[in-house]
Image (cartoon, coloured by chain):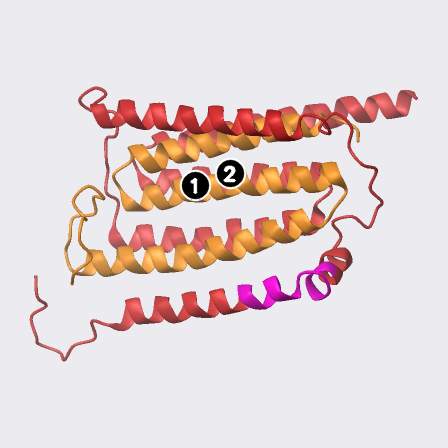
Chain colours: A red, B orange
Amino acid sequence: MIVASVGNVLVWAVWIVAAFACLASGAAVVSFSNPFYSALALIGNLGSLAVLYLLLSAEFVAAAQVLVYAGAVMVMFLFVIAYIGPRIESPWAGGPGWQAVGAVLAAGALLVEIVVVIGLKASGHLAHSEHVGAAFGSPAEIGRLFLTDHLLAFEITSIVLLVAAIGGVVLGAHSRRPAGEVPPL
Amino acid sequence: MIGPGVAWYLAVAGFLFGTGSLGVLLRRNPLIVLLSLEIMLNGANLALIGFARNLGDGSGQIFALAVMAVAASEVVVGLGLIVALNRKRVTLDVDRLNTLRG
């Protein structure tokens, strides 16, 4: 009993730290004027999200999040930011324009919509969670689901990645011109 | 399930989605628009994984992995576009990029 309540407090503490880190770094991504700092804040956001995934017993997704997102995708982002050079943008200069007011209103409306839909559709079964075994979210379970129930999604995902890779090559290679030619402005 | 209930995770997911949509609508730099889009996708991922835990069904985690693959492809194409625009010396401002003609 005491062990269970200590575990409960511990999980709450980890959740509070991870959730606040997640929300704070999300706000930092939106508000930093230098894209380099925004990308670094997004890495923190992805890391704290991985902690939340671990608390939801999604071990494989948390590992994939750190490896694929915080590793590969964000390194690509940082390379591109370093390549095109820092472009400082001051998003809050000149007071709030009509676009900023509209953006805040639209984001608030989206948030209200999410809360209302979840409250209407799911409030009945949010209070008690199903009991899950130790295999839930493990790589073996994810692999079994991918190769049995969701095989079509798995294959379509590979096609999407292939198309994206070809698109990246096409976008990156189109301006190979002979030396000495002046690039068109 | 020890610790906070799934509703708490859903609240974090909703706020993440709202933050990301604010960034997409507010910022003019396409790089930061892409980063905010990542926040929106991650909010959706957190909701998917929360519901997967709540219902005891692993399919939500499969969807989250598929969303991550789609996000990786989106980043490849988006960053390719940004590099191509930068090579043509176009201003990187989404308000001015209203045509994609070379």
Looking at the image, which is closer to me, A124 or A78? A124
Residue identifier under label 1: A40
Q: Residue furthest right?
A: A1
How far apart in space, not on screen, are marks 2 and 1 (Cα)? 7 Å
Quadrant containing the C terminus of chain B is bottom left
Q: Main secondary structure of the magenta part?
A: helix
> Can you give x and y, in whole percent of width and height, for residue A171 in the image?
29, 67
As for residue A95 lying within the magenta part, the answer is no
* Vertical relation: A148 (above or below) A118: below
Residue A44 got which mark? 2
Query: Residues at badges 2 and 1 in contact (C-beta under 8 Å)?
Result: yes
Quadrant containing the N terminus of chain B is top right
> Can you give x and y, in whole percent of width and height, for residue A148 in the image?
73, 64
Question: Badge 2 sits on which subunit?
Answer: A
Q: Residues within 10 Å of mark 2 (few under 14, many from 20)?
A: some
Q: Residue furthest bottom?
A: A178
Under mark 1, the amino acid is: Leu
* Relative side of A165 to A149, left or right: left
User: What residue is shown at x 54% (from left), y 40% (from top)?
Assistant: B44
Residue A137 got which mark? none
* Relative side of A64 to B42, left or right: right
Residue A131 found in image quarter = top right
User: What residue is shown at x 21% (from left), y 47% (from top)?
Assistant: B92
* Relative side of B48 to A70, left or right: right
Q: State which region is magenta.
A: A145-157
Under mark 2, the amino acid is: Gly
Looking at the image, which is closer to me, A6 or A91? A91
> Can you give x and y, in whole percent of width and height, for residue A119 in the image?
61, 25
Q: How many marks?
A: 2
